[in-house]
Amino acid sequence: MAPEYDVLLTAYDIQPGEIRLKAGEPVRLRFVNTTNQGLTFSAGGFFRDARLRRRDASLVRGGNIRVPALSTRTVVLVPKAGRYKATGANFLHRLLGMSGRIIVE
């Protein structure tokens, strides 16, 4: 079974701010939105380079995962080595600090 990591989303933050993964090893990412508004996690390069589980591919659109209010979305993927930027898709949320990075070694 792939290791699972929680990625907590708020309108002002992504936690952890730095996600470290191993290249070529399957991982389960669970995006958790604890706010009363829908949020979008954006990591275009990361999702483009990764191999997503077929049934999860529909959750990632244009490098984004939309997570409705008070809910979660889980994807299983195999990441490719690299350093990737992760942000909220909303410009105001990015200005307020909703950003992080993904490091795959």
Image (tube, rainbow, N blue to C red):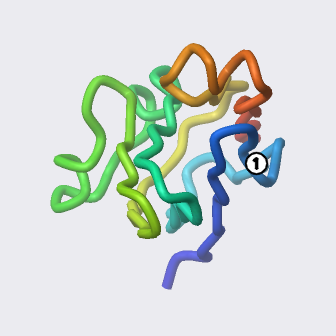
Outermost front residue: 36
Residue at 38% x, 33% y is 64
Q: Quadrant of residue 98?
A: top right
Residue at 17% x, 61% y is 55
Instruction: Residue 93: give x, y in percent of width and height.
Output: 63, 26
Mark 1, residue position: 19
Looking at the image, which is closer to me, 30 or 53?
A: 30
Category of crowding for the residue at label 1, using alpha-carbon neighbours closer than 10 angstroms: few (below 14), some (14–19), many (at least 20): some
Looking at the image, which is closer to me, 99 or 96?
A: 96
Instruction: Residue 20: give x, y in percent of width and height.
Output: 78, 49
Q: Is residue 84 above or below residue 26?
A: above
Q: Is residue 13 left or right of residue 45?
A: right
Q: Is residue 102 left or right of residue 78?
A: right
The answer to whether one can see residue 89 in this image is yes
Q: Is residue 86 left or right of residue 64?
A: right
Q: Is residue 37 above or below residue 76?
A: above
User: Split into 4 quadrants, where in the image is the C terminus?
Assistant: top right
Q: Is residue 68 left or right of residue 9?
A: left
Instruction: Residue 102: give x, y in percent of width and height.
Output: 71, 37
Q: Is residue 26 above or below residue 96?
A: below
Instruction: Residue 63: give x, y in percent of width and height.
Output: 38, 28
Which element carries disc 1, helix, strand or loop? strand
Q: How many marks?
A: 1
Outermost bottom residue: 1
Looking at the image, which is closer to me, 56 or 42?
A: 42
Residue at 68% x, 27% y is 82
Q: Is residue 97 above or below residue 31?
A: above
Which amino acid is tagged 1? Ile
The answer to whether one can see residue 29 in this image is no
Residue at 39% x, 63% y is 73
